[in-house]
Image (cartoon, rainbow, N blue to C red):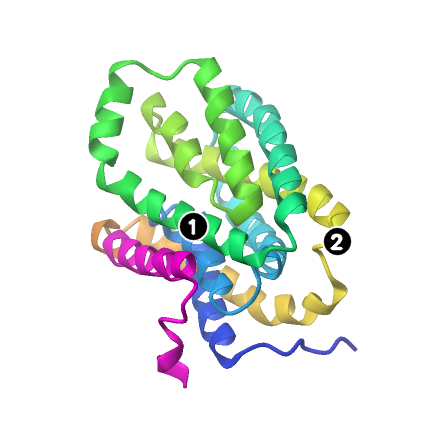
Amino acid sequence: MFSIPTYPDLFWVTAVLAIFLVGVSKAGFGGGTGLIATPLLALTIPVADAAALLLPLLIIADLFSIYHYWGVYDRRLIRIMVPAAVVGIALGALFFNTFSHNDRILKFGIGLLSVLFVLFELFRTRIFDRLEEHRPSDGAGILLSSVAGFTSTLAHAGGPPATMYLLPQKLSRQVFVGTSVVFFTAVNLIKLIPYSYLGLLRVGNLTTILILSPMAYLGVRAGIYLNHRFTDRWFNRVIYVLLFLTGVQLMSGRNLLGFLFA
């Protein structure tokens, strides 16, 4: 029988919220929702532990999502994106291996990615207006998919570069979501190889993963429901504010939220 690792009290609050939001994002509701998972967990545990704990849960959410969207994706784009992402995953694994013993650098990096993503979203309309004037080439798709593989390996944050390539393709909403789901399912499964090689996957996390996995399912079901009935505008705004504050905290290295659970 596997024991539950000892975590700070705040971990369980952030973990439940993070995994639920990952599920919502995997179902296509809330553009940047899933990006907040690693930064939230990194507030309470080391970055390497947060990334390793999230990967199996992301894969569980992927499997729930791909069942719903299987067959509804652009095969040509997947053939371009997945091989390019493998290069980014390899580079991300090399970066992780280099700085795995310096959690301060990793937290600063994830915090910076979080803040940059929020800034990206603020100027997203202008960026995509320009991109849509000239649909990204296959070469741009290879570059952006490689970046997606890199940032996904570090912080499970490959959404923005992948979206920069997919959105201007003018796919239907269902095909856009389905292509994203298939792409990140493949990316997350491939990431098991370097994570295992780097010793990030630990048997001791199994009990925690089993406890949290129902939240991934509930998040996916909630995301599918919301995706067909509501706009995600205000939902995204709340997530971006939370992501920005989390990113600033990780960059500062100070426990700005600790007073809530003192």
Dot 2 lies on which element? loop
Residue 207 lies, in percent from the top left, at 68, 71
Image location of residue 252, percent across then percent down: 39, 60
Q: Is residue 218 visible?
A: no
Q: What residue span does the magenta drawing correspond to?
A: 236-262
- Helix, strand or loop for the magenta stretch, by majority: helix
* Rendering quarter of residue 130: top left
Residue corresponding to mark 1: 35
**Location of residue 47 (image quadrant):** bottom right
The amino acid type, in three-letter code, at marker 2 is: Gly
Residue in the image at 50% along x and 28% along y: 145
Q: Which residue is mark 2?
A: 199
Residue 25 within the magenta-colored segment of the rendering: no
**Residue type of the residue flagged with mark 1:** Leu
* Mark 1 closeness class: few <14, some 14–19, many ≥20 residues within 10 Å: many
Mark 2: few/some/many CA within 10 Å (<14, 14-19, 20+): few
Q: Nearer the viewer, residue 39 or 259?
A: 259
Q: Which mark is residue 176?
A: none
- Under circle 1, the secondary element is helix
Q: What residue lies at 31% left-to-right and 48% top-to-bottom?
A: 228
Q: Quadrant of residue 40?
A: bottom left
Where 154 sits versus 128, above or below? below
Image position of 4 (left or right of 106) = right
